[in-house]
């Protein structure tokens, strides 16, 4: 007997429960309930396909294969026995790219490389989880140096000093260059390079989602705080004394349906400038919920999404 | 039985008794506070060492290096990559505090990747190719090369099919 339940179904149910509490408030505050914020042509629906894949051939495939060969050479990856090129439309991310999947003689996928419409490398991974290899990088500084060289060599536009974190169970390093636009962070966007302990590439991902126009006027911090406080009061009712705003800052965020059960199942593909209100819980409420984020449109103060930390 | 298990809840390394800690998660009891904690050691006792195939702990903390939760489902805390085999098992969890949106995005990509020819390990690698909040990190134990299908069924159980 299988007891697995679709994560999408479970997650959707959880979102519904969370959303019911604030649906009324959200509507009152002008949340675009039911309005698609994703790719209107093929919106992602929980439980449905995430990607549409189409084989690519001819000149276009040749270009992608040449790009993959260049990446492979720069990373020191083995030559594949076969390669497959597909055009992938990602309904969840609202993105599209050419994906080259490389396999050995037995048909086992060795890795993949993704290239966006501008031909830029936006994703790469070496499969197999072969953490053991050559001499280990001795420390975070060595990992930073190795990852920075790789990023530069691959033309990843990774400017500045990356954050470096050890991977779980001593299986390598993760370097992250976060994206900022005019001093405003874009959480999730930027470049990430994962290295095995000996400095070989495990994975690369570059994310640069489109930004909406900045609002003509931006709410000041005091007004945003007041709106956030009011929303938290509506959200938590008698338990408001167990929630306190800890951070309040502008950021480019993807609108989502965290508090709107009728909304799209995927985050918006165009980021909007928002005041991000993060509130932490205390007391009995913290038994179930650690924190909540509210995304308040920087121009109007409307709730355009958020997040939950259980 | 060799079932799969999915939990989306509040997870942590809680006090079990006195100063003793253990990893666990809050029971979904429809309560806003005070929900019972399900500890790894209690699951282990109840399951009496029976293997689960695919376990996903969509919570905070239960993917950390010190987690005891894989053992509760008889999944060894090893990472068997290419050329190795830890049985038909895969445990997925997250490090530290993980926001719902990151877990949702990661798991959506994970399930999607398993279908078109990838095993659980490759699906894990593919799922990581996305935009996440700073500090988000997933972890796994078990076998990288495995389909994710439940089984094998135990012997001597005439009512299992």
Image (cartoon, coloured by chain):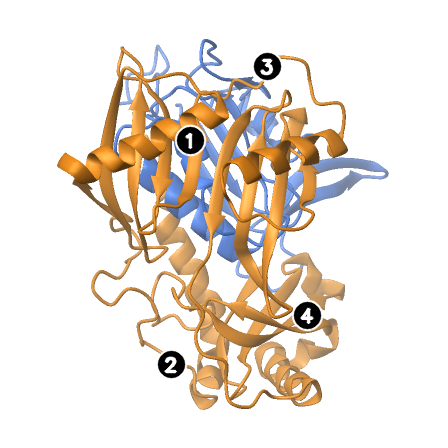
Tell me the element at label 4: strand
- What number of labels is visible? 4
Which comes sooner in the sequence, label 4 or label 3? 3
Q: Position of residue A45 (x, y in %)?
A: 28, 58
Marks 2/1: CA–CA distance: 42 Å
Relative to B115, is A174 on the left or the right? right
Camera-side mark, 4 or 1: 1
* Spatial CA span between label 2 and label 4: 23 Å
Q: Given this view, does label 2 or label 1 mark the residue nearer the observer?
A: 1
Disc 2 to disc 1: CB gap under 8 Å: no
Chain with blue colouring: B
Check whether the beta carbons of the residues at disc 2 and disc 4 lie within 8 A of each other. Answer: no
Q: Which type of secondary structure does the marked residue at label 3 adopt?
A: loop
Q: From the viewer's perspective, is the residue at label 2 or at label 3 nearer?
A: 3
Sequence-wise first label, 2 or 1: 2
The residue to which callout 1 is attached is: A71
Indicate which disc, 2 or 4, sits on the residue closer to the N terminus: 2
Q: Earlier in the sequence, mark 4 or mark 1?
A: 1
Q: Quadrant of residue A37?
A: bottom left
Q: CA distance from mark 4 to mark 1?
A: 43 Å
Residue A185 numbered tag: none
Which residue is denoted by mark 3 in the rendering? Answer: A132
- Residue in the foreground of this view, choosing between B149 and B110: B110
> Which residue is tagged 4?
A279
Label 4 crowding class (10 Å Cα cut-off): few <14, some 14-19, many 20+? many
Q: CA distance from mark 4 to mark 3?
A: 41 Å
> Closer to the camera, A74 or A8?
A74
Disc nearer the start of the sequence (3/1): 1
Q: Chain of mark 4?
A: A
Q: Is residue A204 above or below residue A23?
A: above
Identify residue for label 2: A32
Residue depicted at 69% across the width and 47% down the height: A161
């Amino acid at each position: 007997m299988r007891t697995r339940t679709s994560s999408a179904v479970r997650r959707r149910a959880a979102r519904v429960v969370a959303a019911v509490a604030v649906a009324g408030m959200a509507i009152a505050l002008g949340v675009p309930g039911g309005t698609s914020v994703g790719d209107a042509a093929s919106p992602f629906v929980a439980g449905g396909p995430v990607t549409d894949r189409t084989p690519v051939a001819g000149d276009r495939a040749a270009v992608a294969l040449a790009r993959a060969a260049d990446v492979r050479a720069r990373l020191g990856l083995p030559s594949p026995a076969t390669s497959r090129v597909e055009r992938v439309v990602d309904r969840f991310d609202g993105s599209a790219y050419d994906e080259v999947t490389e396999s050995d003689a037995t048909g086992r996928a060795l890795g993949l490389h993704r290239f966006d419409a501008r031909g830029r490398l936006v994703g790469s991974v070496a499969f197999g989880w072969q953490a053991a290899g050559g001499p280990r990088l001795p420390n975070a500084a060595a990992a930073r140096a190795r990852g920075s060289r790789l990023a530069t060599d691959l033309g990843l536009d990774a400017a500045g000093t990356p954050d470096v974190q050890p991977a779980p169970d001593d299986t390598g390093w993760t370097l992250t260059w976060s994206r900022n636009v005019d001093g405003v962070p874009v959480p999730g966007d930027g470049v990430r390079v994962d290295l095995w302990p000996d400095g070989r590439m495990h994975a690369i991902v570059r994310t640069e989602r489109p930004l909406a126009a900045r609002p003509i006027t931006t709410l000041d911090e005091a007004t945003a705080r007041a709106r956030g406080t009011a929303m938290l009061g509506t959200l938590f009712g008698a338990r408001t004394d167990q929630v306190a705003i800890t951070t309040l800052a502008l950021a480019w965020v993807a609108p989502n349906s965290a508090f709107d059960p009728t909304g799209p199942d995927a985050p918006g593909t165009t980021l909007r400038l928002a005041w991000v209100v993060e509130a932490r819980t205390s007391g009995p409420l913290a038994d179930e919920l650690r924190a909540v984020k509210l995304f308040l449109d920087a121009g109007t103060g409307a709730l355009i999404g958020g997040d939950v930390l259980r | 039985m060799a079932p799969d298990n999915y939990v989306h809840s509040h997870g942590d390394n809680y006090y079990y008794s006195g100063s003793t800690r253990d990893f666990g998660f809050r029971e979904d009891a429809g309560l806003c506070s005070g929900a019972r904690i399900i500890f790894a050691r209690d699951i282990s006792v109840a399951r009496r060492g029976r293997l689960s195939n695919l376990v996903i702990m969509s919570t905070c903390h239960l993917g950390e290096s010190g987690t005891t939760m894989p053992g509760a489902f008889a999944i060894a805390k090893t990472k068997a990559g290419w050329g190795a085999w830890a049985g038909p098992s895969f445990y997925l969890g997250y490090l530290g505090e993980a926001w719902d949106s990151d877990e949702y995005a990661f798991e959506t990509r994970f399930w999607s990747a398993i279908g078109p020819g990838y095993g659980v390990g490759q699906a894990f690698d593919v799922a990581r190719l996305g935009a996440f909040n700073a500090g988000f990190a997933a972890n796994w134990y078990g076998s990288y090369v495995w389909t994710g299908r439940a089984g094998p069924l135990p012997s001597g159980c005439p009512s299992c099919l």
